[in-house]
Amino acid sequence: MSAAEIVDWANSIIWSKALIYLCLGAGLFFSILTRFVQVRQIKEMARLLIHGSSSAQGISSFQALSVSLSGRVGVGNIAGVAAAIGFGGPGAVFWMWLVAFLGASTAYVESTLGQIYKVEYQGEYRGGPAFYFDRGLGQRWLGILFAVAAIISCGLFLPGIQANAVGNAFTQVTGEGAIVFGNIGAYKLLALVVIVTLLAIIIFGGIKRIARFAELVVPFMAAGYILMAVIIVAMNIQELPGVIKLIFEDAFSPMAGVGAAIGWGVKRGIYSNEAGQGTGPHAAAAAEVQHPAQQGFVQSFSIYVDTLFVCSATAFMILITGTYNVQGTLEAGQFIVQNVAPATEIGSPAFTQMAVSTVFGGFGQIFVALAVFFFAFTTIVAYYYIAETNITYLSYITKTPSLLFITKCFIMISVAYGVVSATGYIWGIGDLGVGLMAWINIIGIIVTYFIWKPTIKALKDYEEQQKAGVKEFIFDPVKLGIRNATFWEERLKNQQKSSSND
């Protein structure tokens, strides 16, 4: 077997239906255990986004949300949704909504764990699955395994893929320009210089600069994209009731294939919102909050932003303008539904570009290209931060000098290569890392629940303080029976010492 065939074989195992059912099952499991915290606490989620603040060591809740959204809101929100519709039919959108709704509870659990077991290291807050498997479960080997998987996928392979999308989006607006090196045009080389320079400025500034960048770009990026979708829907408002009816009817339609709709809807939903994959807790742990549950609430809300807002924007634009095909289990080149040219690539931004062009003409192509540019670039920054945090974890446990400078150089090389050429089985290797992260994280947080129940204890404690009407929340892990949450133990001691001095 060739290397590419080995990677494909491994991916067929890791990304099997078992992982889809595991993500759905975990979401349902934690929704029931938390009594659907993603619904009950939605008002508190909004409050925390507005009132959160940063510190010298940590970033604000809103900044942490923006950093995690920069990873979630990516090319998958444009091309991934198109693939779900193209292969699973309009009903796949319903299953994307369902997995987002259930996944919001999983996001609460993993992000609260990230906060509980975070550490302060070299003047910054750090945390994530590697930390909570090590400190919470007491399984350092599992923390190391997760860290290695995250570094390989998020630090080496996935940034190059996203960089290729950024480079293509850049030249889609400017053109390739004169060929100056091999088969690379002048504007592609200009894109490489611009992208690598911007990335270097951001990542060499640390988490504070990453957070400020995400805080400025991500809300603007998502809001602009959603606004465009609202305009398109408004101009085709008479079609909206039929589109909503189509989504719900097709979700269970034998003609479109219930299995295809569920499979593609759930898989693309998981790819998009990343609930349970262990990516969100890295940014969540960096936030400055009074109580770990607070950032769990905020990260739960991020799932709604990603799937229910941004992915839905793409879906409604495509469906309401009818710019899509649905490939069935028929012979190659035949479709269950064919509204556009059969050669149109499913799983690319093409459906979305055509949808925007029906209302805005040639500007639609430019708008989607710009959206891809910003979505993909912010995802690269988020990938770097995940890789950086896991490199920091390995330095933290081994007490060795940090390798962050080398990591920064490697990711810029990966991005530079990706801009001009992201071919071969690099996609498959990246998917292997992400899939392995998901398996480790979901199983790990379920096992953690059965052994210690830290996130449920934290939720109960927070809601009791809510009912008591406290202004300043306090988290006492020892009192709650949560072990090894040393950051919060020390913080509480300092608070008590400060109060006694006053």
Image (cartoon, rainbow, N blue to C red):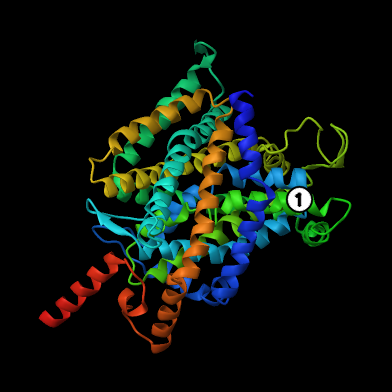
Residue situated in front as seen by the camera: 385 or 14:
14
Where is residue 365 shown, x and y percent of the image? 64, 36
Residue 297 in sight: no
Q: Is residue 135 left or right of residue 84?
A: left
Residue 410 visible in the snapshot: yes
At x 70%, y 43%, the residue is 83
> In percent of the image, x 30 and y 50: which residue is there?
208
Q: Image quarter for residue 309?
A: bottom right
Residue 3 in the image, given as x and y percentages of width and height:
58, 25
Question: To which residue does mark 1 refer?
Answer: 319
Which quadrant of the rendered structure holds the C terminus?
A: bottom left
Q: Residue at x 62, y 57 (%)?
A: 22
Q: Is residue 315 left or right of residue 296?
A: right
Residue 368 picture quarter? top right
Depth check: 411 or 11 in front?
A: 11
Image location (x, y in percent) of residue 200: 34, 35
Give the crowd class for mark 1: few <14, some 14-19, many >=20 residues within 10 Å.
Answer: many
Quadrant showing the N terminus: top right
- In depth, the one of 386 and 345 nearer the eye is 386
